[in-house]
Every structure is written in C-alpha cells, then in structure tokens.
Image (cartoon, helix red, strand yellow):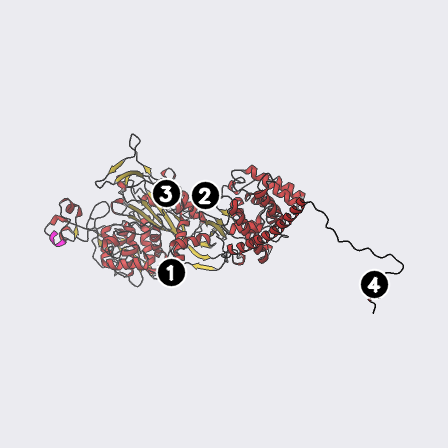
C-alpha cells in the first residue's frame, strides 16, 4: 500500500497549503509590577486567613469569657437589688401609704413592669439612646465599626463616639464588666457584643427594655425609673407627664452634669433636646414638643411636705432591727446576710406606725429650747472622743485630759440628759417611737426607746406586786397596810452599806457582821428618806403615793420569785437577770441589774386595759417582691390577768393622776373627758426617771436620764429632777394625738363592784362606820363588813379618789 496517498496527506482541494504554526510567544511584563502583584495577592490571602483565624479566636474568646455568666443575664428570673419599702396605714383615709425606704449606701431601686412605664418614657430613651432598637439584632455594627476606627485607627470624629445599643447598656448595668480603654477596652467590647447578640436572640425587645429601664442609674444611689419618678417628682412612674419623662431620660447620660438639683439649666436643655428627637421621629406632635419644652423644672423637693432627708426615723431603725432578726431566724443566716437581704430584696413591710403620731412625737422630742426636758449638762470622763461629742477644752484651747496610773489617757466631754418615748395600742402595735432628744442626724443611731435597758424604779410595782396581790386575792383596794419598814434595824437583815464602807466592814459575812449593830438599817425607805409614820394605810393610798413601805409589804405577801416569774415569763421582760433580780428590792423597788426597755415596759402596762398581753411588734407582714407573704409577725396574745383584776388595777392607777395624793396629781390629759391611768418611777439616786401612762386608746412610756447613769440632782437639783417632767411631756403629747378622737371609755368588768368601805378598818362599811370611801372589789372576793365599835370622835383620812383635782400645786410632793 502506498501510504503517501492516504487522506490525511492529501492537500485541500482548491486552496493553499497551510503554514506551519509558530510556537506562541509569552507576552512581555514589567518585572517589578509582576513582583508587586504576586506580593499583594499573597498578602490578601494571608489577610483573609488571619482575619478568619482572628474571627474564630474572637468567637472562641467571647464564648470562653462569658461561659461563667450563669444566671447573670437571665431576664426571666432577674434578681436585681431592689430597695425594701415600708408602708403604713394613713389614719385619715385607712389607705396604705409609703412611710420609708430601706436602702443600702450603694443603691435604691423599686421594680416597675413595662406596662406601668409610660410610652413617652420608653421612647424618650429609645429615640435618644438607640433609635433602631426594635430593628437591630442587639448590636449596631455600622456605629460599632465607626467607633472602633475612631478609637483605635484614625480619629475621624472630634469626640469619642458611643455605639452601645440598649442591650449593650443593659449588659453594663447587669455586670461589673465596665473597663473602657486600651486592649482591655477592646476585649470588653468584644464580650459585650457577643452577650448583646445572645441576649437579643433569647429575649423579646419588651423584656429587654423593661430590664433596662429598671437598672439604669441616676443621681446618688437612685436606680430604675420607678425610684427616679418617686424621688424627683414624688409620683408613681405611671403618672409621669411628657416633660417629666424627658427629664428622667436626660439624667442618665451624665448624672453629674445633668443633676436636676445642681445643674437644672443643663438638664432643661437636654430635656428639650430629647423631646425634639421624639418629635422628629414621629413619637409626639410638634404641639406636644413645644408645650413640653415650655414647662419649668419643678421637682418634688420644692414640696415642703415631702421629706428629702435620707436619715431614717427611730421607728424605722427599730423596724429594721426587728425584721433582720426575723430573717435570721427564718433563713438561718447571720446578721450581715440578713441585712443585705432586706436592703436588696425588694420587700414590702406593712408597719404598725401611725405616721401622724410619729410626727407629733418627733416634734415634741425635738425639745426646742429645752421645752420639756432640761439639759443638765455635766462633764463625763471617757477614753476616746467621737465626732459627735462636745469635748471639754482647757482655757488655752487644748483638750482637757487626765492620765491614769496605768498610762491610760482620759478625755472629758460635756453630756446632757436624754429621753425616750414610745406608744403602743392595746393590741401590741407600736404606733410611735423616738429614742432621743433633738434632731436625728444618723440612721440606725442609738435608740433609747427600743434597745437600751434602764432600771424601772417604782414603775414595776403595779405590774408585779400589786397586780398579783389583787389577782391572788391577797390584798384588795382597801387592805390596810402599815406604813413602816418591813425590816427594822434590830432585825439585822439589810446592811447599811454606807456605814460598812466607811468602817471597812464590806468584806465581812452576814454572820460576822452581826457583831456590829450599827452595820444594819431599816428597810425600805420611802422616797425622800423617810421610813413612814407607822400608820395603817389602805392599799390604794400607798400605790397612789408610791410608798415603798406599802409596796414591799404587798410584794412580801406575793413573793419575789412569783413576781419575777410573772414579769419575766408572762410580761416578757426578758432583759431582767434570772440570777440577780429575784428579790424584793429588784422586783418591787426596781433596782434591777440591767432593767428593761421603754418599749417592753409600755407593753407590760397593756394588761391594765382588759388583762390581755400582746407581744409588742412593729410590723404585721412582710411581702416579697411578687406580693407573697414572706414573714408574719410572731406576736403572741394571751390573758395575763383576769379582766376583774385588770379593771381594779386600772382604777387604782387612776388615782396616781386624779387623787390629790397621787404622785402625778392633776396632770392627766384633757382629752374630751376621757380618763387616764399611770405610774411614776424613780431609780436609785434619781438616775432614771419614768412615767408610763394609759388612755382608752394608747399606752405610752417616757424615760428621762443620762446615757451613762448619773444622779440628776447633781446637775438639776431636787426640785427639777422629778418625774413630773416625764408626766408633763406625756400629757402634752396625749392632748395632741387624742384631740380629734371620739370619746372612749376603759372596758369594765362584770365581776367588779363598787362598794363603800370603812376608812379606819378597810373592811366594807358597816352601819356604825363614821368615815367611808368608795373602792373597787372583785364580786367573788369581797372584804368582810366592818362591825367595829368606832369612837364618834375619831376622824379617819378621807378618800380623795372620788373626784379629780384640777390645777393643784404638787411641787412639794415626793414623786416616788
């Protein structure tokens, strides 16, 4: 075969033979441009890789850095610090009103649901802080990138740019993650962005907005819009007007620069700018904007009836202490933890305080010009001086001091008398309490009405010896008792400590001391130093005059241990000392180791209303932030005395005020004809002076003395240092708080009868008794009828308990 004739070799018909193709030549390039292109491509690839790695690292970092957030951003169960609120019953309307707020030094917040917050207030923040709030995913990336470029690369703006959405601001409020500069600032922003994205995916915008509006900070310790509305405008947040909403929204940008009290002009400009934004964004009309901008800045502080001081009242201080104690018992936590729970738990405490009575008592106890309680200044030696002390200085201006043998330096301060007053009703509700004289300058300061114990003096006589003597049937209204010491000097029962001290006999035992007849004395003495006149007196007279000689004889009949058990266990005077206070001197004369508080003593006198005792308490319920009952007061009520004994004692104690021999004669309050009862008391050496008085509405205890017990006659003299000071203050207070109350009588008892008795024998008056008076007796335990043969010429002391004595001068009477 001729291979040269194959089809492949045949030339195309009718055309030229094709040229041999040439080898293609590479297009020439500039060597430098070629190198730059390759470098740029490499850098872009590396950049993409680095950015990818950086993004992965950033996400990994953000996930790891926020892994321990736990419930920090759990908005469904958000547990923010909320101040607890004290509410009281308005005595005029019966409505619950806010009385006080228990806030820590760090914050004050009251939660408000979004439905309570006006739309204008919501958009006042949205229009100014984050106008794309409802459309963005929790982060505004455009603003964020611009802010980062301005901060870290190229300052394209004249000032630092904010790029935070409301979600990001909320995260700042809920966390302590707030560093803002350098590398740490960039990392913080990264964490914040990641959290904001997660928050936006998890919760609705409404939930986020509600949390934001309840966590933003204003001036001082104020947090949340509800608290701001109350503090700045004395309103609930739901009642705010447009311009008030804009005002509140203005403060948060810079609480110092836009402080409504110190920079009102700055605040008004900011407020009007916010309302302008709202108008421009279609939230309000132009007319609303112009009307709002024309409004002056009127704050609640200009309302003189609103208390702006953060200093809590003595009542609130005591309430705080009581609730903290009950939280400790309920939760089994220590005091510090319980205090923190109360400050931040958002509780509502339903208090027993009567706001009008509390204000009246506070005003009286301001004691302006020493109107009720004389000052009685004297120097007191101390080992240190506080800022509140009035330090004694030498003539050359140096502090007065003394150095002890052991090198201790003693300073001197000037101190004055102090006083305390507390009022309860007969259900144990503490209605008013003031624990010191003058203006209160500190919260949780010394509360002499609630937490300081004092010897009771003679105020213990009726709640112990006399009440039990009547209750046990040992004595009655007219039982005749001898006005003389229970123990005579020759009985060698009671030491004369002054004699023993002067003669170096203090270390001897009682048996050794029997060799010294003058080392003993008669006991007791009456106030003023007398030992009585040896006459027989009816019980009512001894009680009205507060004669120790009569009271001791009643106490001896009852028994010191019986009295102690009654006042300690039944009347809950648990600050008495079971080891050292079981004696007649302590239980009848009132010379206890520590004594009792005014609150506890006032509560003990409740029994002279109807015989019932109720534990004194300052609240009825504590509600948690959801309105559930968290605590109920643990007060107990029970019959301490029979109603018969209670009524007889009520009539006996009436004589203290209405009889011309009573220690508070003529000093009963003039309250629409309502009656009163009371008892004065003086501790040893006039170191503590008392009066406890009751009306058909209230029982009140008044104490007067020095913080460090001191004989008041050394500074005020015998004529000034008398219990009439306490009585006068009580009388003035009662006349004010009872001025508009309807007439009310003490409850009577069917088991008590009025009978005439013979003033010579104390028995029921017989036909031959020449002198009679009226007494109150248990119907089932009447005295015998007097059948003595009285001499017609014998005149007995007439009873003076049948009519009040008004305006009598009792200056010279011994008070106890």
Do the numbered discs 4 and 3 sit on residues whose CB atoms are within 8 Å?
no
Alpha carbon of mark 2 to alpha carbon of mark 3: how far? 18 Å
Residue 126 appears left or right of 541: right
Alpha carbon of mark 4 to alpha carbon of mark 3: how far? 133 Å
Residue at which label 2 appears = 309
**Residue 246, disc:** none
10 Å neighbourhood of mark 4: few (<14), some, or many (≥20)?
Answer: few
Q: From this view, report whether residue 497 is shown above or below residue 767.
A: above
* Lower sequence index among marks 1 and 2: 2
Camera-near label (2 vs 3) is 2
Q: Nearer the viewer, residue 770 or 156?
A: 156
10 Å neighbourhood of mark 3: few (<14), some, or many (≥20)?
Answer: many
Residue 756 appears left or right of 298: left
Q: Quadrant of residue 415?
A: top left
Alpha carbon of mark 3 to alpha carbon of mark 1: how far? 32 Å
Instruction: Determine whether the residue tagged by mark 3 lies in a helix, strand or loop.
Output: loop
- Figure disc tally: 4
* Lower sequence index among marks 4 and 3: 4
Q: Give the magenta part as a residue range.
A: 508-515
* Lower sequence index among marks 2 and 3: 2
Do the numbered discs 2 and 3 sit on residues whose CB atoms are within 8 Å?
no
Q: Residue at x 55, y 38 (%)?
A: 264
Residue at which label 4 appears = 9
Do the numbered discs 2 and 4 sit on residues whose CB atoms are within 8 Å?
no
Do the numbered discs 1 and 4 sit on residues whose CB atoms are within 8 Å?
no
Q: From this view, report whether residue 299 is shown above or below residue 46.
A: above
Residue at which label 3 appears = 437
10 Å neighbourhood of mark 1: few (<14), some, or many (≥20)?
Answer: few
Camera-near label (4 vs 3) is 4
* Lower sequence index among marks 3 and 1: 3
């Amino acid at each position: 075969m001729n291979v040269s004739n194959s089809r492949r070799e045949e030339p195309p018909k009718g055309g030229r033979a094709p040229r041999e193709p040439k080898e293609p030549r590479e297009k020439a390039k500039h060597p430098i441009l070629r190198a730059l292109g390759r470098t740029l491509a490499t850098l872009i690839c590396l950049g993409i890789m680095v950015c990818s790695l950086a993004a992965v690292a950033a996400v990994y970092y953000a996930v790891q850095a926020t892994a321990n957030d736990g419930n920090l951003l759990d908005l469904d169960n958000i547990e923010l610090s909320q101040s607890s609120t004290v509410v009281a019953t308005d005595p005029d309307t019966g409505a619950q009103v806010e009385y006080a707020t228990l806030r820590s030094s760090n914050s004050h917040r009251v939660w408000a649901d979004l439905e309570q917050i006006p739309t204008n207030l919501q958009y006042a923040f949205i229009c100014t802080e984050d106008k794309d709030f409802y459309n963005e995913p929790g982060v505004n990336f455009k603003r964020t990138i611009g802010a980062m470029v301005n901060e870290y690369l190229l300052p394209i703006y004249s000032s630092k740019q904010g790029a935070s959405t409301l979600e990001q601001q909320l995260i700042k409020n809920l966390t302590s993650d707030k560093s803002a500069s350098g590398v740490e600032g960039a990392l913080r922003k990264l964490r914040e962005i990641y959290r904001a994205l997660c928050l936006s995916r998890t919760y609705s915008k409404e939930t986020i907005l509600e949390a934001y509006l309840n966590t933003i900070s204003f001036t001082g310790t104020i947090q949340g819009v509800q608290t701001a509305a109350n503090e700045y405008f004395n309103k609930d947040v739901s009642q705010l007007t447009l311009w008030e909403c804009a005002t509140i929204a203005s403060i948060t940008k810079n609480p110092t620069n836009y402080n409504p009290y110190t920079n009102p002009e700055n605040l008004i400009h900011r407020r009007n700018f916010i309302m302008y934004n709202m108008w421009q964004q279609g939230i309000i009309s132009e007319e609303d904007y112009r009307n709002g901008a024309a409004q002056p800045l009127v704050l609640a502080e200009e309302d003189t009836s609103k208390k702006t001081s953060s200093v809590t009242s003595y009542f609130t201080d005591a309430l705080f202490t009581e609730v903290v104690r009950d939280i400790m018992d309920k939760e089994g936590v220590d005091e510090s933890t319980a205090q923190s729970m109360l400050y931040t738990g958002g509780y509502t405490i339903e208090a027993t305080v009567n706001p009008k009575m509390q204000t009246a008592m506070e005003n009286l106890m301001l004691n302006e010009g020493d109107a009720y309680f004389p000052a009685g200044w004297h120097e007191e030696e101390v080992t240190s001086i506080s800022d509140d002390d009035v330090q004694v200085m030498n003539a050359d201006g140096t502090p007065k001091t003394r150095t002890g043998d052991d090198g201790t330096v003693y300073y001197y301060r000037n101190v004055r008398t102090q006083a305390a007053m507390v009022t309860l009703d007969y259900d144990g509700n503490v209605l008013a309490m003031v624990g010191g004289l003058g203006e209160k300058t500190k919260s949780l300061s010394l509360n002499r009405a609630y937490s300081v114990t004092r010897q009771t003096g003679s105020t213990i006589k009726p709640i112990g010896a006399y009440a039990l003597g009547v209750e046990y049937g040992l004595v009655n209204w007219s039982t005749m008792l001898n006005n003389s010491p229970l123990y005579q000097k020759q009985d060698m029962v009671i030491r004369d400590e002054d004699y023993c001290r002067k003669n170096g006999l203090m270390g001897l035992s009682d048996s050794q001391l029997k060799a010294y007849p003058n080392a003993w004395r008669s006991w007791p003495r009456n106030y003023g130093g007398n030992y009585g006149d040896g006459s027989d007196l009816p019980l009512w007279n001894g009680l009205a005059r507060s004669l120790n000689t009569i009271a001791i004889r009643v106490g001896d009949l009852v028994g010191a241990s019986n009295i102690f058990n009654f006042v300690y266990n039944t009347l809950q005077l648990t600050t008495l000392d079971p080891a050292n206070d079981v004696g007649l001197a302590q239980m009848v004369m009132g010379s206890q180791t520590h004594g009792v508080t005014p609150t506890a003593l006032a509560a003990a006198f409740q029994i002279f209303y109807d015989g019932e005792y109720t534990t004194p308490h300052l609240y009825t319920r504590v509600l948690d932030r959801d309105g559930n009952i968290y605590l109920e007061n643990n007060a107990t009520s029970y019959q301490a005395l029979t109603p018969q004994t209670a009524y007889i004692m009520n009539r006996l104690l009436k004589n203290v005020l209405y009889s011309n021999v009573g220690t508070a004669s003529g000093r009963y309050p003039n309250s629409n004809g309502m009656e009163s009862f009371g008892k004065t008391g003086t501790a040893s050496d006039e170191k503590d002076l008392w009066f406890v008085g009751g009306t058909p509405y209230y029982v009140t205890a008044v104490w007067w003395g020095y913080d460090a017990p001191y004989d008041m006659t050394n500074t005020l003299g015998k004529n000034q240092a008398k219990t009439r000071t306490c009585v006068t203050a009580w009388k003035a207070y009662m006349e004010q708080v009872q001025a508009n109350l309807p007439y009310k009588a003490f409850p009577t008892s069917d088991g008590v009868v009025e009978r005439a008795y013979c003033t010579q024998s104390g028995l029921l008056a017989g036909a031959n008794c020449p002198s009679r008076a009226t007494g109150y007796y248990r119907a089932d335990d009447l005295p015998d009828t007097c059948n003595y043969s009285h001499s017609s010429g014998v005149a007995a002391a007439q009873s003076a308990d049948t009519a009040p004595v008004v305006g009598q001068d009792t200056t010279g009477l011994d008070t106890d």
